[in-house]
Amino acid sequence: MEWLGLHFLTELPDSGQVVLQCSHNPVLVLLAYIVACAASFATLDMAERVSHVEQATHQRLWRWVGVCCLAGGIWAMHFIAMLALEVPLEIQYDLPLTLVSLLLALIAAWLAMNTLSHIELPLWRYGVASVWIGLGICCMHYVGMAAMRSSASLYYEPMLMGLSLLVAIGGSLAALLLSRHLRDGSGMFHQLLKYAISLVLGGAIVLMHFTGIWSMTLVLPAGSLPTSVAPNGHMQLGLTLSVITLLIIASGISAALADKKLQHKERDLRRVNALLSQLDQARVSLQQVAHYDALTNLINRRGFNQLFAEKLMEKNTFGGMLAVMFLDIDHFKRINDSLGHDAGDELLKVIAGHIKSSTRSHEDVVARLGGDEFCILINLHERDEARLMAQRIMQKMKEPIELGGRRMVMTTSIGISVFPDDGKTCEELLKNADLALYQSKGAGRNSLHFFSSGLKTRATLELQLEEELRNALRDDQGLLLYYQPIYDLKLGRVTKLEALVRWQHPQHGLLLPDRFIDIAETNGMIAELDNWVLRKACEDLAYLSQNGSGELKIAVNCSALNLTRDTLAEEIAAALRDAQVAPQRLELEVTENALMGNIASTLALLQQIRDLGVSLSIDDFGTGYSSLAYLKRLPLNTLKIDRSFIQDIPKSTQDREIVQAIIVMAHTLHLQVVTEGVETLEQQQFLEHYGCDYLQGYLLSRPVPLQDLGRVLDELNQRHDRLNLRMPGLDRGEPGSPGPAPDSPDHHADASTVQLIR
């Protein structure tokens, strides 16, 4: 079989022919291998670029660059290897067939790059593509061989030709599969692996070529002899073709590398722009979070402070008035406790809407400072504008709110300070508005108050007293215990004392408990003050025992806050143990409202105290909201009737009946009865007639310090005629007299209901 002058299936003639021996120039063979490796590397690199480029036009461009690099490399490798062939003949090449071989190389390269352009293909598609690519390379090779023009005939061994075709197909399949795995790699290892694969593929391409050369035999006609051939410049031509091909391939690779870097820069630029956009959005979000309340969408404390400073600077520059209005929702905690925090949040949204709708949207600033506290900045022409706005808000708050299936009406307390009258700085104005708010709360809530200089003076004094009370407790200086006798009507003598705390202040003199108890409770010192009273009373009990009054009992008041502490029983036991006093000589007085606060935990704590042997008394009975169902369960010993029921006896029939009923009820529950605030003989006679057990009040004695107690007790115990009981010096105003009139300040301080330690 002969095609283009090539004998494929024709056997060599038996005689008359001369078979030529061929050799190869090793330098040109090496150059052919280098060109094949460079073409393989360029093909892999272009396939990688195509997969990474996003635009379709750029993908087509790099696909054709890859086609040119691969086709040019294979074609140049073939002809450099042909130039390396050394035979004793004059060989020339047919230009049209040479160009046809180049066209076949381009077709094979296009098939390869087109296949590599797809991200994912099934394996059988890669197999089909490799067959076509291998056939194209083989056709390019054998057409290029056919372009040789010489006096010799070319004969081919079919088996070796088939082997060259298999090598071409196998190399093509390997290139396709390896390129797919190299597509998404990066780093030094990826680049080294690409180099190694390029060397292997280049070797496969050269192997295919020389397998084809191996299958070729050159035969001269009979009678012809090989001739010596002068150097024909094959080396120079091969070097030139190698350099040109490598430059073209290197240019393509360089362009791909530059485009890769440019694409990375563009991608980085887009990423930077995206990050900047995200940062802008994050900045806006952070500004929203930093300056606005997420629940009500009102300005929060940080944003309010910033706007407040700006408005204050504006007013300082251009003049004008500015009002700061503090609002606090009355009894808001009950909503959270009863309906839950979700309902409380919904209520805050509605209230925020009410407040916002009552203000001037473009002029006033409404902020939520936290919890149920709101603040408003108002531009003013006169002070009454702030009052009118506050009244509008209070009126708007009276509208019923549907919440949790209930209709409820909330109220608000408002405090107002005005620039420049009430302060020149943000801190001063806010503090003064807060003081006015507390005045509104103290006035019964649901009211508004403007700041006045007296509020600041009182707040300063309260702060000073707080600090000095803390120092007094720490240094154990200035605090005193006064004792008021409690008279046993059945025994006709004093058997108990009530301990009442006093504070000998260095500037303000002797302060009664109603002046500093609230300060102790508000600032977390009440537990420490309770403990001081307890220990001092136990020490005084020990002192009384040493001085012949070992039968006396002392009653100390216990604050409602102290009943919430689990360590109270331990503290009582420690105080008794340190003073070496019998527990039966101590009585703890608690108000009925304190008992009803948390009945389950209170009952357990009182039982622990009773187990110590300490007596328990319920103080100010009748003024709270105690339940008889719970009262019978409490481990009490004594019930003390509040003085408010005694003041109008015997004139008030209703009070007489109430006191009589309380005494009967207490005795039914096996409780002893103490009546405080007894100031007249008629009150004493009435109580004794109806079976009251103990009396306490100014008829007997005012509270006295420990050093005066012995004399007062001696005088009281010497009077056995209870109907004619009077204090020595009652008419003379001497020490030990009943004291001032019932409506005097000192009288009210001790006789009034004090629910904390006194």
Image: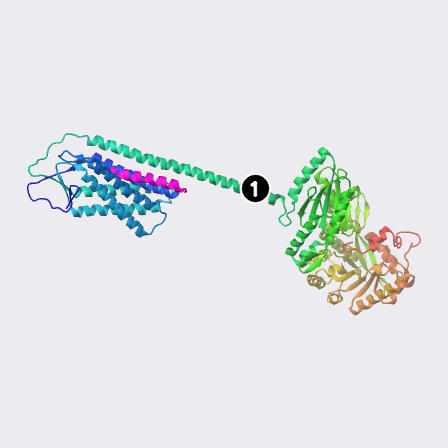
Q: In the displayed image of the protein, which residue is found farthest to the front?
A: 96
Q: In which quarter of the image is residue 143?
A: top left
Q: Colour scheme of this structure image?
A: rainbow
Q: In which quarter of the image is the C terminus?
A: bottom right
Q: Can residue 468 be seen in this view?
A: no
Residue 31 coordinates in the image, percent (x, y): 24, 35
Please tell me whether residue 54 belongs to the stretch shown in magenta.
yes
Q: Mark 1 points at which residue?
A: 283
The kind of residue on which mark 1 rests is Arg
Please tell me whether residue 206 belongs to the stretch shown in magenta.
no
Residue 312 coordinates in the image, percent (x, y): 70, 37
Please name whichever residue, 412 or 154, is drawn nearer the observer in this view of the structure. Answer: 154
Please name whichever residue, 203 or 116, is drawn nearer the observer in this view of the structure. Answer: 116
Is 605 placed above or below 381 here? below
Q: In the displayed image of the protein, which residue is found farthest to the bottom?
A: 668
Image check: 538 left or right of 648?
Answer: left
Please name whichever residue, 567 or 347, is drawn nearer the observer in this view of the structure. Answer: 347
Q: In the displayed image of the protein, which residue is found farthest to the right?
A: 731
User: What secondary structure do most residues of the magenta stretch adopt?
Assistant: helix
Q: Which residue is drawn at 41% across and 42% down?
A: 55
Question: Magenta segment, which residues?
Answer: 53-75
Image check: 39 left or right of 369?
Answer: left
* SS state under label 1: helix
Image check: 396 left or right of 117?
Answer: right
Residue 129 coordinates in the image, percent (x, y): 29, 48
